Image (cartoon, rainbow, N blue to C red):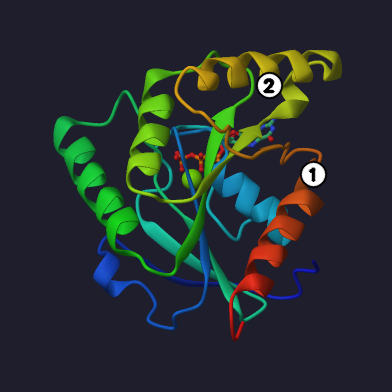
Amino acid sequence: MNVAHAEFVVSNTKVENCPKSQLPEYAFIGRSNVGKSSLINMLCNRKRLAKTSSRPGKTQLINHFLINKKWHLVDLPGYGYARASKTQKKTFQKFIIDYFNKRKELVCAFLLIDIRHEPQAVDLDFMRWLGEHFIPFTIVFTKADKIKEKGVEKKVSDYLETLQEDWEELPQYFITSSENRLGRETILSFIQEINESIPKF
Ligand code: GTP
Ligand code: MG
């Protein structure tokens, strides 16, 4: 799919204030610094559409981006940010959980995992929570450029092995690098296929 048009729409903390246009949307979630905002920029072929930073905790709000005037990408704050205060963490939990519970337009979440890291409880717990709430999601391994090509497969298969302890059927996954645009076409085709399966899209 060609991303011909991408524009920032709105940022907010309340799911009630998210766009009312009823377009299908795809949300990016995962630990702080995992590369959510960078992946959105990579998919849209834009450098600074979503704000990125080498310091965790950059994205603080629910950010909607309108793509090709037909669907939304949603950049969310990260979880597991060690330096966030208790109040910040609580607020985050509330509005993100609210977003996932209430946002009917959400057709699929992309849960990002840094390919270099061992499975972390916070991610496994969040996946479990999504599953329990029947929220469709896929896994996106990020920063594949940071490890040797040969190591990628092993990292992924180790991760999937851990998931097998929890999941009868493994979630779909993508391997990406925002640095060298790996996975771009695959993710965009995945989104396109879902969009086209939605009546009246
Ligand atoms: P928060 O908004 O804080 O939750 O972080 P985020 O998940 O949006 O991460 P962000 O996209 O801001 O990226 C964090 C850092 O990782 C930045 O310094 C990026 O340049 C870097 N980064 C993101 N994706 C990649 C990647 O695929 N490869 C490499 N090498 N660096 C990446
Ligand atoms: Mg971000």
Q: Is residue 198 left or right of residue 196?
A: left
Looking at the rendering, which quadrant does residue 124 occupy? top left
Q: Quadrant of the N terminus?
A: bottom right
Q: Quadrant of the C terminus?
A: bottom right
Q: Is residue 47 visible?
A: no
Query: At x 48% / y 50%, what residue is drawn?
Result: 136
Hey, what amino acid is under mark 1? Arg
Distance of label 2 from label 1 (alpha carbons): 18 Å
Residue 70 rendering spot, x and y as whole percentages: 61, 79
Q: Is residue 33 left or right of residue 152?
A: left
Q: Is residue 56 left or right of residue 71?
A: left
Q: What kind of element bears circle 1?
A: loop
| Residue at which label 2 appears | 156
Residue 67 rendering spot, x and y as whole percentages: 63, 72
Hey, what amino acid is under mark 2? Val
Which tag is nearer the camera, tag 2 or tag 1?
2
How many numbered marks does the figure carry?
2
| Residue at which label 1 appears | 181
Residue 184 rendering spot, x and y as whole percentages: 77, 50
Is label 2's Cβ within 8 Å of ligand 1? no
- Outermost residue on the right side: it is 150
Circles 2 and 1, Cβ within 8 Å, touching? The answer is no
* In the foreground, 106 or 94: 106
- The relative height of residue 107 versus residue 124 in the rendered view (above or below) is below
Mark 2 and mark 1 lie on one chain; the one further toward the N terminus is: 2
